[in-house]
Image (cartoon, helix red, strand yellow):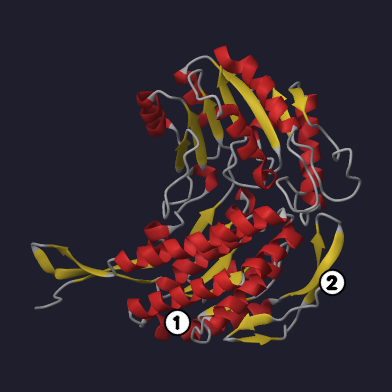
Amino acid sequence: MLEKRQFYINGEWVDPTEARDHNVIDPSTEEPCAVISLGGQADTDKAVAAAKAALPGWMATQPEERLAALERVYAEYKKRSEDLAQAMSMEMGAPIELARTSQFGAGLGHLKNFINAARDFEWEKPLREDHPDTIIRHEAVGVCALITPWNWPMNQITLKVGAALVAGNTMVLKPSEESPIDAMIFAEVMDAAGLPKGVFNLVNGDGAGVGSQLSAHKDVDMVSFTGSTRAGILISKAAADTLKRVHLELGGKGANLVFADADDKAVKRGVLHMMNNSGQSCNAPSRMFVEASRYDAAVEEAAEVASKVTVGPASEEGRHIGPVVNETQWNKIQDLIQKGIDEGARLVAGGVGRPEHLNKGFYVRPTVFADVTPDMTIAREEIFGPVLSILKFEGEDEAVALANDTVYGLTNYVQSTDVERRHRLARQLRSGMVEMNGQSRGPGAPFGGMKASGNGREGGAWGIHDFVEVKAISGWSA
């Protein structure tokens, strides 16, 4: 088991001032795999003070210098690929192959996209050709609290740190206490990149402790949070008293609209996407709506695909899904699967309990429900596990109405070979992202939602924009 680690504050590893021990649990075994310290108010204050002291110097650096620093971070990050993959696999249950590719690779891609975006970013520019004396300047927001989740750890840390860093902000990172080891390795990456003291700081803690302290802190100018909608609301309320900027990436209940003319792989693609990362993705296509003429065949195919999804320990090589992150999440998922059964949905794959070959670990059976109706709990609540709900629709208008009938608005999906239909639906679906026919968003495309899925956009130039203030300066050359 890994020993307790320190906090990274003002360019060095320091002992916690008022810490509590916290066991990090390996969800594959249910056994502790590390002990870390959870900080208190004094630790939060120390990290914020370091970031505040470093802010004037860092935000005054030239964009080229900040870009060079980000390039060094990128280079150091690549060197730690296996360390990061092993940490994420152990602490949050990502199968090692997924950890080495998608989990680690997401962070690498985001850092590269920020480098490319920063090269072209217009930090200062004239308002218009006919008003050259009015300059629009983009500059740092200030001290940023970055609060990140456990499900895609490096994805979220790099989305926030990369943008904040290159925009000239200083920061305090509070990773999830469920997946802190990879974050501490990332702090070593930042240290190796040779940043000025205080630009990047890390304090471990839970949401009720360090998370709440950062959200309400008078010297924090911005909070960027990814996690549950419930926690996002609490952070917004805590931040309101100091009028700090709040950036939220929250939950989702993605609709996947499968029309009769969808390609032959559409259903299989949707099921496997839902099961990826054990269903622990806010943009998972958890509601599959199928046009009536294709519905019965789609249900049969979905059940068959799910039945072939294998489940096993995160440390094992191969393509399978691992456990969910902890006992609390496992119990919640079990309760919702049972709720689906009790409310009359037709269980066609999976169900309650662990897979038969596993008697320990937070493993969930890949589960598919058919004949789900929009009022059922499993059609409305974010389950955050490998559980798919299949619903029927009769026509395009009904499909749009059903897809939009949710408090969430993160990602929706369309499967159809009709180009004009896809264009219509992309305009009507109320979500920050729409992905069609299995095509992923391009590098640097913005990630984010609307409604209860949050605000703001992460990634590429849009991610940088979320970490800058806009200043209008007149009389520039008068």
Hey, which quadrant is residue 320 in on the image?
top right
Q: Is residue 199 above or below residue 448?
A: below
> What residue is rendered at 36% in x and 67% in y?
118
State the CA–CA distance, disc 1 to disc 2: 37 Å
Residue found at the very far top of the displayed protein? 293
Query: Residue 393 appears at what percent x and percent y?
Result: 55, 18
Q: Residues within 10 Å of mark 2 (few under 14, many from 20)?
A: few
Which of the two labelled residues, at mark 1 and mark 2, occupies the earlier sequence position?
2
Q: Mark 1 or mark 2: which is in front?
A: 2
Residue 82 position within the rendered picture, expressed as x and y whole percent measured from the top left: 66, 67
Instruction: Kindly identify which numbered label has been placed on residue 55.
Output: 1
Looking at the image, residue 318 sits to the left or right of residue 249; the answer is: right
Position above or below: 252 against 193: above
Mark 1: secondary structure? helix
For residue 375, above or below residue 130: above
Q: Is residue 42 among what the camera can see?
A: no
- The residue at which mark 2 appears reads as 1
Quarter of the image that includes the N terminus: bottom right
Amino acid at circle 2: Met
- The residue lying at 45 percent from left, 54 percent from top is 456
